[in-house]
């Protein structure tokens, strides 16, 4: 099926209302895009901030009469004018196939691989994590996840208790389980993330205990992994420290290079912190509990 898209210039205070109107006009989908390369790194929990210059993109069937849509918008938005927009054709593709073709097996260090379900693992004797892209964050493509996986590849977790705090898709928890951890706990604020972790754990034949933060037991871990963001990492310092055994490592990521010193200083209260390892603009911090 062929499509066209209407791309409107908008602002955060007007984007939602425009999206609702476009849906009433028959749009098959409406999305928001950054129109000024403005990164949003750490939104407040429960919020979905938009960019100062936001594009509202509405997808319509290619047979749609653009004049009719424009007239409907003029009527529904009156007396306010219709925002500036342009119309573009959308290339007709097999989008599922396109998506699958762009996700390939990835290696992390010497042992770990992430493989989508439609690929045969390149190294059958490696530690292969079978994981498809989904709703929850974490498929190995982001530098912060890669930094943690590369650390795990070199770690000895056999027979140890591991906590993945902010588990997302469960990728780090599953890696730890496949590497021989005796107990793995995944914690996340998002129930969908816990569902994704359980589904991915089942796919990989491992057992992961999953909890919302308030339900997490006070299990003291031999290794704690927290790939979240700098702000939450700092506010969670006391909790994460209490879940880490004396002498055990803590691995922190989701931290921008400009935030590394602040996070490291916070954790130096209880941990001997190592120098940051940098990948692009992101870093990994590792400390040992005193």
Image (cartoon, rainbow, N blue to C red):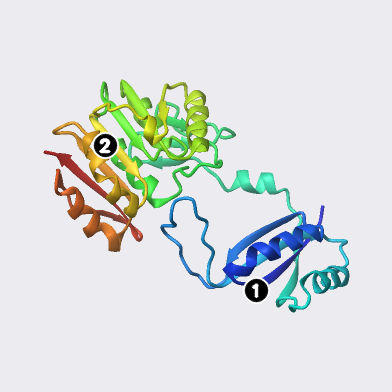
What percent of the width, then of the height, locates residue 145? 39, 45
Which numbered disc, 2 or 1, marks the residue closer to the eye? 1
Q: Nearer the viewer, residue 90 or 208?
A: 208
Quadrant in the rendering for residue 211: top left
Residue at label 2? 154
What percent of the width, then of the height, locates residue 7? 70, 69
Q: Nearer the viewer, residue 109 or 82?
A: 82
Task: Identify the secondary structure beneath mark 2.
Answer: helix
The relative height of residue 211 versus residue 43 in the rendered view (above or below) is above
In this image, 85 relative to 74: left or right? left
Q: Residue at x 26, y 36 (%)?
A: 154
Q: Residue at x 22, y 39 (%)?
A: 241
Residue at label 1? 9
What percent of the width, then of the height, locates residue 152? 30, 37
The relative height of residue 74 versus residue 207 in the rendered view (above or below) is below
Q: Nearer the viewer, residue 267 or 12?
A: 12
In this image, 146 relative to 78: left or right? left
Task: Identify the secondary structure beneath mark 1.
Answer: strand
What percent of the width, then of the height, locates residue 25? 81, 61
């Amino acid at each position: 099926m062929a499509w066209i898209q209407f791309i409107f210039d908008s602002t955060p205070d007007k984007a939602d209302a425009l999206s609702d109107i476009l849906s009433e006009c028959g749009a098959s989908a409406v999305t928001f895009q950054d129109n000024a390369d403005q990164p949003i790194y750490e939104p407040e929990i429960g919020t979905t901030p938009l960019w100062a210059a936001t594009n509202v993109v509405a997808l319509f069937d290619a047979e749609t009469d653009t004049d009719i849509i424009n007239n409907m918008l003029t009527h529904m938005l009156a007396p306010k004018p219709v925002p500036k927009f342009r119309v573009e054709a959308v290339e007709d593709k097999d989008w599922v196939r396109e998506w699958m073709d762009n996700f390939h097996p990835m290696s992390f260090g010497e042992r770990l691989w992430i493989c989508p379900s439609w690929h045969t693992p390149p190294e059958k004797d490696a530690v292969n994590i079978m994981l498809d892209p989904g709703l929850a964050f974490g498929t190995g493509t982001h530098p912060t996840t890669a930094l943690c996986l590369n650390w795990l590849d070199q770690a000895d977790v056999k027979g140890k208790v591991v906590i993945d705090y902010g588990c997302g898709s469960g990728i780090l928890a599953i890696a730890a389980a496949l590497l021989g951890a005796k107990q793995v706990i995944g914690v996340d604020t998002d129930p969908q993330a816990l569902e994704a972790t359980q589904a991915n754990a089942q796919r990989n034949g491992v057992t992961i205990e999953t909890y919302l933060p308030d339900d997490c037991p006070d299990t003291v871990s031999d290794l704690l992994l927290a790939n979240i963001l700098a702000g939450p990492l700092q506010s969670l310092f006391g909790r994460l420290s209490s879940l880490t055994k004396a002498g055990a490592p803590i691995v922190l990521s989701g931290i921008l290079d400009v935030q590394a010193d602040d996070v490291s200083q916070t954790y130096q209260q209880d941990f001997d912190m190592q120098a940051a390892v940098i990948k692009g603009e992101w870093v990994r911090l590792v400390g040992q509990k005193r």
